[in-house]
Amino acid sequence: MLHPVILSGGIGSRLWPLSREHYPKQLLALVGEQTMLQSTITRLENILNLAPPIIVCNEDHRFLVAEQLRCIKVKPSAILLEPVGRNTAPAIALAALAALENDPDAVLLALPADHLIQKVDVFQEVINQAFSISNQELLITFGIVPTKPETGYGYIKAGEQIHQQIQKVEEFVEKPNLETAIKYLESGNYFWNSGMFLFKAQSYLDELKQFEPQIFEICTRAFDKLSLDLNSDFVRVDEELFKQCISKSIDFAVMEKTTKAAIIPLDAGWSDIGAWSALWEVSKQDNNGNILQGDVFVEKVSNCYVRSEYRLLAALGVENLIVVETADAVLVAHKDYAQNVKNVVDHLKRTKRSEANLHRKVIRPWGSYESIDNEPRFQVKRITVNVGASLSLQMHYHRSEHWIIVKGTAKITRGDEEFVLTENQSTYIPLGVKHRLENPGKIPLEIIEIQSGSYLGEDDIVRFEDHYGRY
C-alpha cells in the first residue's frame, strides 16, 4: 500500500508574525479554510491503495496536530514525535520503520505539510503514475516544472529517460543566481526541488544504511525503544538515542548519492509558501493587486498583502508592501525583502523575546490562555477550558493565583478541598498548594487569572497528574 508520510516539523519563520515556533505555518489556514496540514492530507483523496497517513511532528505540536486531524475526520496510523528536530532524512527513516511494521512492501509518499497544490487532480494523477512503477526500486522525487527563473529554490537536473515521464536524476544543484536560473529555465531540463518523494520504505532504508549508517543505526535503535502514550495516539522514540543523530536532509543523506534517484515532472500549481511574497503571488488579488484580510481599510494602495488579525488596520497611498498585524506584533516590509523576515525572528531569539515562539493566545490540549497584561511581579490571563476538559493537578513554587469565573462552571481542587464555582465567583490559590481547574459544564469555561509572585514563567509548574501525559 501507499503510506503517506506527512512531515510537519518546520517552523516557517519567514511567515512571522503569524507563524511562530509553537504554532508554525503548517498549522495555519493561509490559503482557504483548511490549514496547510489539513489540505496536505485531504488532497490525497482519489489516490490508489492509500493507507492512513503517518504524521511526523515536533513533540510540542502533538495536540495541535491531533486536533486538526480530528476536525477533518482522519485517523492516522501513527503520529511520530521527534524529541528534537533532525531534518528530513531521520524523520523519513522513522516513518519507514513504522510503515514496515505492518506492511513489508510499504511504499512511502513523503510530503511536507506546508506546501500548496492548486491543481489537485494533476497532483493525484502524477502520484498514481509514480506508485504504479514503485516496484522498480527507484527513489522518485517530484520535480516542479519551473514557471520563472526562481533563485530561492534548489534545482534538479533530469537525465536520461527511464519510463514514460520518468527520468534519471543527473544532479541536484543549490539555489542559483539569476543568470544561472534563466539558463536553467531555458534549457527545459531543470526542475525545482519540491522536497516530495515516493519510494519503497525498505529501499530507502537500504540506501540510508549504505550512505549514512550512523543515521540508520540511531533511528533503528531509537525506534526499537518506542513507547506509546494517550491510548496509542502518539508514538515516542527513545529521546536520548535520537538526540545523538546528526541533522541531515534526505537530499544530502541519500538522494544526491544513490544511483536509483529518478524524477517525475509535476506541473500542478505548486508553492512552498516560503515567504509573504509567495503567499501574495498565489492568493486571489483584487483589481489593484491587493490581498486584504481581516478588519482592513485601504486607499490608493496597490500590490500589497494587508492582513489584520485583531484590530482595524488602515493603509494609505502605499504599494508593494507586506503588512501583517497580530495581537502582539506588526510586520511592515517591502515585498522584495520578504525573505529577510527570518532575520527578525533570529533577533527575537537572540534577545530571548517570547514573540519568536508564542502568540499572545496560546493553544493547549485543554483549551487556551491569553496574556492580557504582564508586569515584573504580576500577570493577568484569560483562560478558556473546553467542555469536559481539565488542567493538570499542579503547584507553583514562585506564584499564587486568583481566579475569577466569568463564564461557565468551574470544578476546583485546592489542596484537600474540592468545590464548584459559577459566574462572578472567585477563589485564591496560595503559593505551593496543589490545585486543578476542570470544566464539568456544557459550555466553555472562561476565567480571569491574576498571577502574583517573584517569577511568573510557564516552567514554574510541577505536575502530579495530567490527562495529556505532560510531566
Image (cartoon, rainbow, N blue to C red):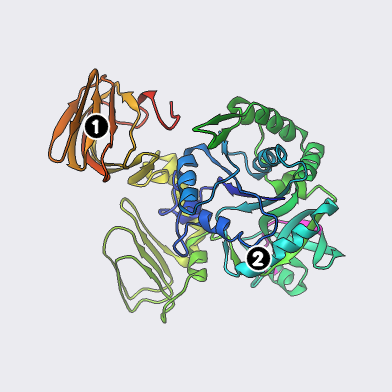
Asked if the stretch drawn in magenta spans residue 346, the answer is no
* Pointer 1 local density, CA inside 10 Å: few below 14, some 14–19, many at least 20: some
Q: Quadrant of residue 378?
A: top left
Residue visible at 61% across and 27% down in the picture: 238
Judging depth in this view, the residue of 77 and 279 nearest the camera is 77
Left or right, 340 with respect to 380, comes to: right
Identify residue type, mark 1.
Answer: Lys
Task: State the mark number for residue 411.
Answer: 1
Residue visible at 50% across and 49% down in the picture: 69
Provide the secondary structure element on which disc 2 rests: helix
Residue visible at 49% across and 65% down in the picture: 279
Left or right, 17 with respect to 90, comes to: left
Provide the secondary structure element on which disc 1 rests: strand
Vertically, is 33 above or below 113? below
The part of the chain drawn in magenta is 169-179
Residue at the extreme bottom: 287
Quick check: can you spot residue 252?
Answer: yes
* Pointer 2 local density, CA inside 10 Å: few below 14, some 14–19, many at least 20: many
Vertically, is 451 above or below 193? above
Separation of residues labelled 2 and 1 (CA atoms): 50 Å
Asked if the stretch drawn in magenta spans residue 173, the answer is yes
Q: Quadrant of residue 355?
A: top left
The residue beneath circle 2 is 123
Q: Position of residue 145 (x, y in %)?
A: 69, 69
Quick check: can you spot residue 24?
Answer: no
Q: Position of residue 53 (x, y in %)?
A: 61, 48
Identify residue type, mark 2.
Answer: Phe
Q: Position of residue 113 (x, y in %)?
A: 56, 53
State which tag comes first along the sequence, 2 or 1: 2
Q: For the residues carrying marks 2 and 1, which lies nearer the camera in this image?
A: 1
